[in-house]
Image: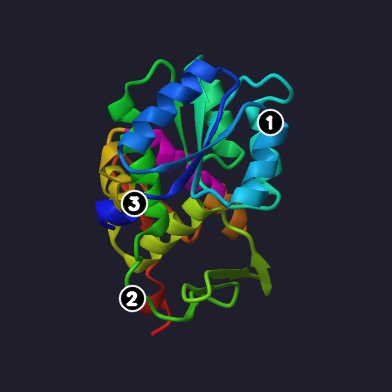
């Protein structure tokens, strides 16, 4: 995606510190983004419903309900990408946000360049074309995929995947039979800026396994190549 297409997107900033909102707004507007503001969790949820932002910057500490609860409410009706803003920078907070459906996190204090870079990276990977893919893929009798319709079927039932889970599965399946390193997966799914964040891969592979594997502890679809990365089973060879 070109810079021109990324710019102009409406970004919702959710933070009760007006000085922080002003700081973020000025930097985003300087880079060509539109900005929507909310100063509490209830307002943020309503803004997502009514304004349909392309991305949400969501502070963890809010005066009415915390950012994690806001994220949970948003995920009940929207898959809009969310970047959590946290002053703590603790591993538990970061993992909690990712587990509840956040696409990324940024720890305060942050530089304007870092924030804008993260926003661009998330928008690129959300909206970038995923290229050509077979319309329907039958991995086996249990797992079927339709990348045109963005559908995943397990045991005859369609399952819901978060956008990041879907992109991860897409790239693994597109390279079925080949090992993708942690770095390759990070660049493909999250963007080049995330090549040094291997915990993202481990976390989302675990999420995917829980949703598509019959026994996540003994996976048959997403296989671990210890110390290297992951490989999706070569269903084409197995079905030939």
In terms of depth relative to the viewer, which is nearer, 232 or 85?
Answer: 85
Residue 218, visible in the rendered structure:
no
Label 2 neighbour load within 10 Å: few <14, some 14-19, many 20+ = few
Q: Closer to the N terminus: mark 3 or mark 1? A: 3
Q: Residue at x 37, y 37 (%)?
A: 29
Q: Residue at x 51, y 46 (%)?
A: 81
Circle 1 SS class: helix
Q: Quadrant of the N terminus?
A: bottom left
State the image coordinates of residue 101 (x, y, percent, origin top left). 58, 42
Residue where numbered disc 2 is placed: 132
Residue where numbered disc 3 is placed: 6
Q: Residue at x 26, y 49 (%)?
A: 184
Q: Which residues are magenta?
A: 197-207
Q: Give the numbered dot on residue 167.
A: none
State the image coordinates of residue 26 (x, y, percent, origin top left). 38, 29
Question: From what the image shows, is residue 184 above or below residue 237?
Answer: above
Q: CA distance from mark 3 to mark 1?
A: 26 Å
Circle 3 SS class: helix
State the image coordinates of residue 199 (x, y, percent, origin top left). 41, 34
238 on left or right of 140 = left
Label 3 neighbour load within 10 Å: few <14, some 14-19, many 20+ = some
Nearer to us: label 2 or label 3: 3
Question: From what the image shows, is residue 60 above or below residue 182?
Answer: above
70 on left or right of 171 = right
Circle 2 SS class: loop
Secondary structure character of the magenta stretch overall? helix
State the image coordinates of residue 105 (x, y, percent, origin top left). 46, 31
Residue where numbered disc 1 is placed: 41
Q: Is residue 115 magenta?
A: no
Q: Quadrant of the C terminus?
A: bottom left
């Amino acid at each position: 995606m070109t810079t021109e297409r990324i710019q102009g997107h409406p970004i919702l900033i959710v933070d009760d510190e007006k000085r922080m909102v002003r700081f973020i707004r000025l930097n985003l507007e300087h880079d060509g983004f539109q900005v929507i503001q909310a100063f509490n969790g209830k307002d943020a949820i309503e803004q997502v419903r009514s304004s349909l932002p392309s991305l949400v910057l969501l502070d963890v500490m809010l005066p009415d309900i915390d950012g994690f609860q806001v994220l949970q409410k948003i995920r009940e009706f929207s898959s809009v990408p969310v970047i959590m803003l946290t002053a703590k920078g603790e591993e538990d907070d970061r993992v909690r946000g990712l587990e509840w459906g956040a696409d990324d996190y940024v720890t305060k204090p942050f530089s304007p360049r870092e924030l804008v870079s993260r926003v661009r990276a998330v928008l690129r990977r959300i909206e970038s074309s995923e290229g050509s893919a077979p319309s329907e893929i039958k991995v086996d009798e249990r797992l079927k995929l339709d990348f045109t319709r963005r559908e995943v079927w397990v045991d005859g039932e369609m399952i819901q995947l978060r956008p990041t889970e879907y992109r991860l599965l897409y790239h693994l399946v597109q390279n079925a039979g080949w090992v993708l390193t942690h770095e390759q997966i990070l660049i493909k799914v999250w963007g080049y800026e995330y090549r040094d964040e291997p915990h993202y891969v481990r976390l989302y592979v675990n999420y995917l396994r829980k949703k598509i594997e019959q026994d996540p502890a003994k996976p048959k679809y997403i296989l671990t190549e210890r110390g290297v990365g992951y490989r999706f089973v070569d269903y084409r060879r197995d079905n030939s």
